[in-house]
Amino acid sequence: MKRLITGLAVVGSMLTFLPTPMAPAASNTATSLLPLDGPNQLETHTFLNCFKGDGHCDFIVGADMRTPDGVTGFPPSLWARQTTEIRSTNRLAYLDVHGTGQFERVMKAMGSDEVTTVYFGEGPPDKYQTTGRIDSTDWSTGQPKTDVNVIVCTHVQVVYTGVNTTSPSTCAQTTFS
C-alpha cells in the first residue's frame, strides 16, 4: 500500500508541470434549413466563440447542401453570395472584423460590420465558409471591451441550375467568458 501512495505523490507532483489549459470561451452555434430541390435542403450555420482574456471572438459562417445521404457541397454551376453582419447591442463597443476568405469584402460601419463572400462552382462543404476574428474595443478608452454581447447573423443567396433562393438569417449571440 505504501508503494501505491508514493506513486500517486510522484504523479501528483508531475501534474504541476503540465501546461495550463487555454482560457474558456463563451460560445454559441446556430443552424437553419431551407428546402431546395427535391429532398435537398440549404443549410446555413454560424459558430461564435468569444474570449474575455484579450477581448476577441472567432467566428465561422457557412452554407452547404443537406441531402438524404448527408452534408455535401454544391453543383458545378453554383454562384452564391453570403452576407454576414457582426454587431453588439452596446453602442460603446467597436467591433473590428477581419475575414480570411479569398472572395470576401468587409464593410465597416459605426455600429456593425458586414462581410460579403462570393462562392463559385462545386467543392467540398468547407469551401463554402468564411472564418474570421472580431476584436472588441471600447470607443472611449481604446482598451478591449468584454462586458458586451456579440451577435453574428448570416444569410446566403444560392443560384445554380433550376435553383435561385435566399436563406433566412442564422444568428449566434454570446458574451465574453
Image: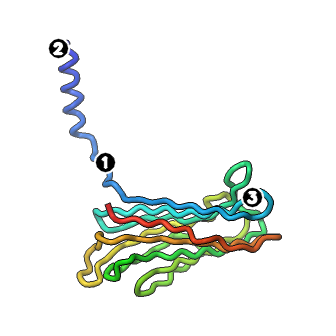
Judged by depth in the image, the label closer to the viewer, 3 or 1, is: 3
Q: Which residue is mark 2?
A: 2
Q: Are marks 2 and 3 in contact (CB under 8 Å)?
A: no
Under mark 3, the amino acid is Asn
Pinpoint residue 155: horizontal percent, then vertical percent.
60, 72
Q: Indicate left or right for 122 with 83 as reference.
A: right
| Mark 1 residue crowding within 10 angstroms, few (<14) / some (14–19) / many (20+) | few
Q: Where residue 81 sits: x, y (%)?
A: 64, 75
Q: Residues within 10 Å of mark 2 (few under 14, many from 20)?
A: few
- CA–CA distance in space, label 1 to label 2: 32 Å
Please report contact status of discs 3 and 1: CB closer than 8 Å, yes or no: no
Q: Nearer the viewer, residue 175 or 6?
A: 175
Q: Nearer the viewer, residue 74 or 157?
A: 157
Q: Which residue is mark 3?
A: 40
Q: Quadrant of the N terminus?
A: top left
User: Against 116, is 18 above or below?
Assistant: above
Side of 33 relative to 139 (left or right):
right
At 37% from the left edge and 70% from the top edge, which residue is drawn?
149
134 shown above or below 14: below
Q: Which residue is mark 1?
A: 21
Give me the C-alpha separation between circle 3 and circle 1: 41 Å
Q: Secondary structure at mark 3?
A: loop
Percent x, y for residue 163?
Answer: 78, 70
What secondary structure is marked by label 2?
Answer: helix
Q: Are marks 1 and 2 in contact (CB under 8 Å)?
A: no
Q: CA distance from mark 2 to mark 3?
A: 64 Å
